[in-house]
Image (cartoon, coloured by chain):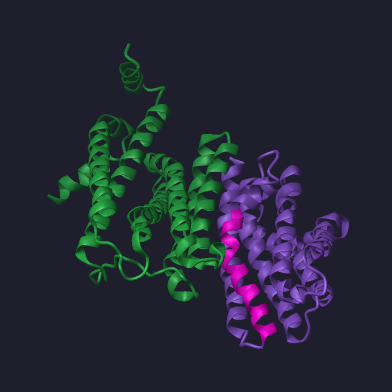
Chain colours: A purple, B green
């Protein structure tokens, strides 16, 4: 059963490329456009890069949240899950992990290009990749709750970020400060590990909460 | 004694009993609250000693800032606890309380942020208020209230909105310890807690006594407002029942 669900997620990655391509393109475009706001040759770009790239990534991930359950609710798959075909929290967990693999991993893979363009160098770029890798999991796990709660509302688009954005503050703090510490040559391991801890805690608890939320709105 | 208390406590779960008993509680809390706020504020603003050490008269905004911040957090905690009780034991009055807390808590956290900003701007200088951990964690609480409020507006079905409110309130309560300990964990300009359970405040009694009065009075006032809102909401939800019909007719004077 789990293998079938994983196979289904893999098929969705191939057949609906817009789900993971659009957030990535958004990530790149906004990062490039944001460079206009930074005075040229001021050296500010490298200093601001961790925060700027992380906030843009957060926006891109939040825009991708709506696609998490949308198609599955439309074609009745979520209803099938809720009547007992699969354990609902397992379904949500696989959804989160699927989103993480197709958006989070790719974002982490391409983040160095933007980091170098912003003038970052050395170990900080590597730490940025790791923080994006861990942090995007937290963001998608917590965001799944917002996606589930707004899944039955026609125009959920702007509502989802409003619900979950306040919950992202700890992740943002630890992720950004780990990159910043690495860039400044300070010990960066503690905030980086905190980012990982938040991801693990979120991925343990949120599937059950989100499954409950899906059940609520389906009634 | 314990048995009688238990019976009395369980009665709060009944909308009918609550609507009947509500006005008494609500009015006495509101009166105590307003009188207390008047006493505490006048004492604090006009008669409490001047802060000679550092901040002068601008420190007097503490008499509004600390109570509103405490109330906003307490209301959030109350909302989350009500949410848990509602989801676990399905007691319908609890979610009525929780959903009526949202707007009140939102206003109190806005008041805490506004007074904090008015206080912080001249005393901290141009350090950038929003980068302070205590301030953005409180702002996060404000936005959690806003999020629940906005979600309530978007969901038409009362039953769905009830449960969604409960879930979101419970998940958002992870923010409360972050607010509480932000001044200790992070590098914050914000001062530490004024009142703790274990130690007396590090101020003159003439300074903290009016503050304590205001904190307690704000509690009573917020409680009274929530009770008043919850009473009408309970009446609205039970409007199909005959006792509620009678009560409504009585209220609109027929």
Q: Looking at the figure, which quarter contains the C terminus of chain A?
A: top right
Is B52 drawn above or below residue B32 in the view shown? below
A15 horizontally vs A43: left or right = right
Quadrant of the image occupied by residue A208: bottom right
B123 horizontally vs B31: left or right = right
Q: Where is residue A167 in the image (x, y as percent from the top left)?
A: 57, 60
Q: Position of residue A93 (x, y in %)?
A: 65, 62
Q: Is residue A90 magenta?
A: no
Q: Residue at x 65, y 63 (%)?
A: A139
Task: Write the start and end of the magenta stretch as one range.
Answer: A164-184
Secondary structure, magenta segment, majority class: helix
Taking depth in this image into account, of A135 and B205 the one nearest to the observer is: B205
Answer yes or no: is residue A84 visible: no
Q: Looking at the figure, which quarter contains the N terminus of chain A?
A: bottom right
Taking depth in this image into account, of B28 and A63 the one nearest to the observer is: B28
Quadrant of the image occupied by residue A59: bottom right
Q: Where is residue A62 in the image (x, y as percent from the top left)?
A: 70, 56
Count of numbered tags: 0
Q: Where is residue B35 in the image (x, y as percent from the top left)?
A: 23, 42
Is A7 drawn above or below residue A127 in the view shown? above
Answer yes or no: is residue B128 visible: yes
The residue most toward the top is: B254
Q: Residue at x 66, y 70 (%)?
A: A135
The residue most toward the left is: B1
Is B243 drawn above or below residue A174 in the view shown? above
B167 horizontally vs A71: left or right = left
Q: Which residue is drawn at 41% across and 39% down?
A: B96
């Amino acid at each position: 059963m789990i293998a079938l669900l994983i196979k289904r997620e893999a098929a969705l990655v191939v057949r609906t490329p817009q789900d993971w391509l659009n957030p990535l393109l958004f990530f790149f475009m906004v990062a490039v456009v944001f460079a206009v706001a930074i005075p040229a040759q001021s050296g500010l770009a490298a200093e601001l890069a961790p925060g700027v790239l992380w906030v843009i990534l957060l926006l891109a991930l939040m825009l991708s949240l709506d696609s998490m359950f949308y198609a599955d609710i439309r074609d009745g798959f979520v209803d099938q899950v809720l009547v007992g075909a699969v354990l609902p929290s397992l379904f949500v967990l696989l959804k989160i992990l699927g989103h993480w693999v197709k958006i989070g991993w790719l974002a982490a893979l391409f983040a160095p290009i933007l980091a170098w363009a912003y003038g970052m160098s050395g170990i900080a770029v590597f730490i940025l990749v790791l923080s994006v890798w861990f942090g995007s999991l937290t963001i998608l796990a917590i965001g799944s709750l917002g996606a589930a709660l707004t899944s039955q509302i026609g125009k959920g688009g702007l509502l989802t970020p409003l619900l979950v954005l306040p919950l992202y503050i700890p992740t943002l703090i630890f992720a950004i400060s780990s990159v910043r510490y690495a860039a400044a040559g300070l010990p960066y391991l503690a905030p980086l590990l905190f980012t990982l801890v938040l991801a693990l805690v979120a991925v343990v608890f949120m599937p059950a909460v989100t499954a409950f939320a899906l059940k609520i709105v389906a009634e | 004694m314990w048995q009688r208390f238990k019976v009395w406590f369980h009665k709060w779960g009944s909308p009918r009993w609550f609507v009947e008993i509500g006005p008494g509680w609500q009015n006495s809390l509101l009166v105590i609250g307003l009188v207390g706020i008047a006493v505490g504020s006048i004492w604090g603003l006009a008669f409490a000693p001047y802060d000679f050490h550092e901040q002068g008269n601008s420190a007097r905004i503490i008499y509004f800032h600390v109570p509103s911040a405490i109330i906003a957090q307490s209301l959030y905690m109350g909302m989350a606890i009500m949410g848990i009780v509602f989801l676990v034991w399905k007691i319908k009055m609890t979610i009525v309380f929780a959903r009526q807390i949202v707007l009140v808590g939102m206003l109190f956290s806005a008041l805490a942020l506004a007074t904090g900003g008015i206080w912080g701007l001249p005393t901290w200088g141009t350090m950038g208020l929003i980068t302070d951990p205590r301030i953005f964690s409180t702002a996060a609480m404000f936005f959690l209230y806003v999020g629940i409020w906005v979600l309530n507006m978007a969901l038409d079905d009362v039953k769905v909105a009830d449960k969604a409110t409960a879930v979101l309130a419970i998940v958002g309560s992870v923010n409360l310890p972050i607010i509480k300990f932000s001044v200790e964990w992070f590098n914050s300009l914000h001062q530490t807690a004024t009142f703790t359970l274990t130690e007396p405040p590090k101020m003159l009694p003439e300074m903290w006594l009016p503050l304590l009065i205001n904190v307690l009075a704000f509690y009573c006032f917020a409680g009274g407002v929530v009770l008043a809102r919850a009473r009408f909401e309970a009446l609205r939800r039970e409007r199909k029942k005959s006792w509620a019909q009678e009560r409504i007719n009585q209220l609109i004077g027929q």
